[in-house]
Image (cartoon, rainbow, N blue to C red):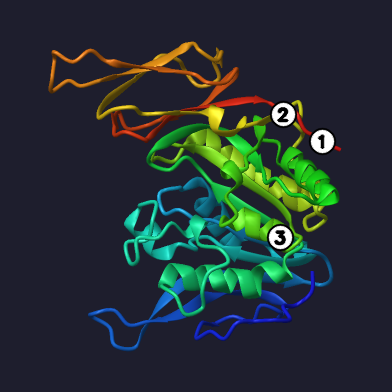
Amino acid sequence: MGNPTAVRPSSAFTTVDLDREGKQVGFLMIPHSPNDDAWGATRVPLAVIKNGSGPTVVLEGGNHGDEYEGPITICELIRELDPGRVQGRLILMPANNVHAVMAGQRVSPVDGLNFNRTFPGDTRGTITMQIAAFMTDHILPRADAFLDLHSGGSSLDILPSAIIEPTDDPALHVKNVAAARAFDAPYSVVISNLGEPRTATAAACRAGAITIGTEMAGAGTVSIEALAICRRGVRNVLAHLGMLPPEDASPRRGDGTVLELPGSAAFVFATMDGILEPLHEKGTPVRAGELAGRIHCTWDPTRVPDELFYRADGMLYARRQPGRVRPGNCCLVVAAPYQGVLA
């Protein structure tokens, strides 16, 4: 991609040069004047590793602050990767929603916003919106590829998977599928977020970048299995894109099967205030109309539990982690075989 041509006025600045050769580690600085700091700044970690010609690949972690495998993987690359092994430019951002990362929560405690619902951002908005605006105006236009590393966070436990972001561009879709397959997670899943356009991956597709995400387990912890998959998968994709030598990729383990979330029917939502009793383990085949779980009101033993039912055929892909639920909470998610074009 080229350098940005139309950039909105902004007070944000960086302590690194995005276009300089070598390895630099610093910050995106956004002036921030809360009650206890007159002329302070929010510091978003930012590293650049550049060597010769080649693609520009952006790695984002900490989009949500309670998702850990991606940020750990990116920080390791920043510390350990020899610039001489890189062909092109890596832009590494391990804690983009930095206030949420430091708080270990999904949304920013500074402005209450979900970073992944703020794109294209606003250079004169709140801190979260300004970070999204910097990504939109200065990072994504430089990107040939974008890897957005997520997990299920504190509220979901998800089968480790590479995520394919849908796009209306057929050629880009094929590249997205190929990159997800190169990641070689146990599952590759097409997730549209019900058509939500304000996510980082949706913004990356609009910028024309090869785009994949991940869902690396979750449950509010670091999964040993998922972290190993993430470490391996990131290097697999960088080798696939020609940024790292082919020998840095691991031998293929998966069969290339692609799944999708079949629209709103994929989701089972809580119907009442109570305690969720799920009935199936992740990976279990399920059918529409089958009993999926119950919600118990243990503080009112006279109340009969509400029954929840699956609304799609497929496989149980994700389960809510906290037992306590409120009406509208996502309790269970079903994935089904992908019906679209793969190549």
Residue 33 occupies which quadrant of the picture? bottom left
Q: Percent from the top left, x then y, of residue 237? A: 73, 48
What element does badge 3 sit on?
helix
Q: Which residue is mark 3?
A: 206
Of tags 1 and 3, the one toward the viewer is 3
Which of the pair 222/220 is nearer the observer?
220
Q: Is residue 98 above or below residue 4?
A: above
Q: Residue at x 55, y 33 (%)?
A: 264
Q: CA distance from mark 2 to mark 1?
A: 9 Å
Which of the pair 265/240 is nearer the observer?
265
Label 2 with label 1: CB-CB less than 8 Å: yes
Identity of the amino acid at label 2? Tyr
Horizontal side of 161 relative to 21 (left or right) equals left
Q: Which residue is mark 1?
A: 342
Q: Earlier in the sequence, mark 3 or mark 2?
A: 3
Q: Which residue is mark 2?
A: 338
Q: Residue at x 37, y 35 (%)?
A: 329
Label 3 with label 2: CB-CB less than 8 Å: no
Identity of the amino acid at label 1? Leu
What element does badge 2 sit on?
loop
What element does badge 1 sit on?
loop
Quadrant position of the N terminus in the picture: bottom right
Identity of the amino acid at label 3? Arg
Residue 319 occupies which quadrant of the picture? top left
Q: CA distance from mark 1 to mark 3?
A: 19 Å
Quadrant position of the C terminus in the picture: top right
